[in-house]
Image (tube, grey):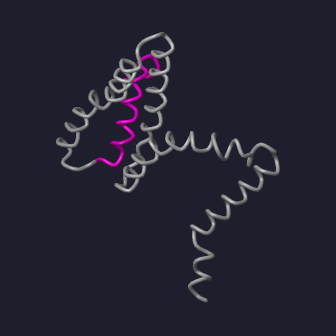
Amino acid sequence: MKRVKSLLISWEALLVLLLLIGVVIGSVLSPYFLSSFNLEYALPSNIMEIAIMALPMTLIIIAGEIDLSVASLLGLTSVVLGLLWQSGHPMWLAIGVALLVALSPSIAVWPMLFWVIRRSATFPPLLPIWDLGLSQAHSFPGRA
């Protein structure tokens, strides 16, 4: 009985309760929320994009770091891929350029970060935020 009570007042139980409340509110507010189309087509089609972002973010968070550049780079590479495809370039070329765009901030920033780590002899706690700022400044030169 004690175990069941502790399970019901746990963080996970609260998250499940909030999820259920959100589903109920969504289905009450919109007749299309729990439609067969959403459950059969729309939900599965979005799972891959979310999983591609969630897997690296999970590893980063488990490692004790916070790095918000995963989502911004996903958005940037999606736009690059879409614009190249829309302008008539072959898909293999668009994918290659999008991958290069995704890797370019890391290629440009990480040598500087390794230099800072080596000079400081410790891992500075704000380094992932600095990495994010430099990566975004490199990705969007007009907005730095």
- Residue 16 shown left or right of residue 50 in the figure: right
- Residue 130 shown left or right of residue 116 in the figure: right
Place of residue 136 in the rendered image (x, y in percent of width and height, measured from the top left): 41, 28
Q: Residue at x 41, y 20 (%)?
A: 91
Place of residue 82 in the rendered image (x, y in percent of width and height, measured from the top left): 49, 20
Question: Would you place residue 116 above or below residue 87 in this image?
Answer: below
Displayed quadrant of residue 3:
bottom right
How many marks on residues?
Answer: 0
Q: Quadrant of the N terminus?
A: bottom right
Say which of 129 and 25 sits in front. Answer: 25
Question: Is 142 contained in the magenta span?
Answer: yes
Say which of 30 and 73 sits in front. Answer: 30
Q: Residue furthest bottom?
A: 1
Question: Would you place residue 53 above or below residue 76 in this image?
Answer: below
Question: Would you place residue 78 above or below residue 10 in this image?
Answer: above
Q: Quadrant of the C terminus?
A: top left
Place of residue 67 in the rendered image (x, y in percent of width and height, measured from the top left): 41, 43
Say which of 40 and 87 sits in front. Answer: 40
Q: Residue at x 72, y 46 (%)?
A: 36
Q: Which residues are magenta?
A: 124-144
Chief secondary structure of the magenta span?
helix
- Residue 76 shown left or right of residue 27 in the figure: left
Place of residue 58 in the rendered image (x, y in percent of width and height, measured from the top left): 42, 52
Say which of 107 and 114 sits in front. Answer: 107
Q: Residue at x 17, y 41 (%)?
A: 119
Question: Is 141 contained in the magenta span?
Answer: yes
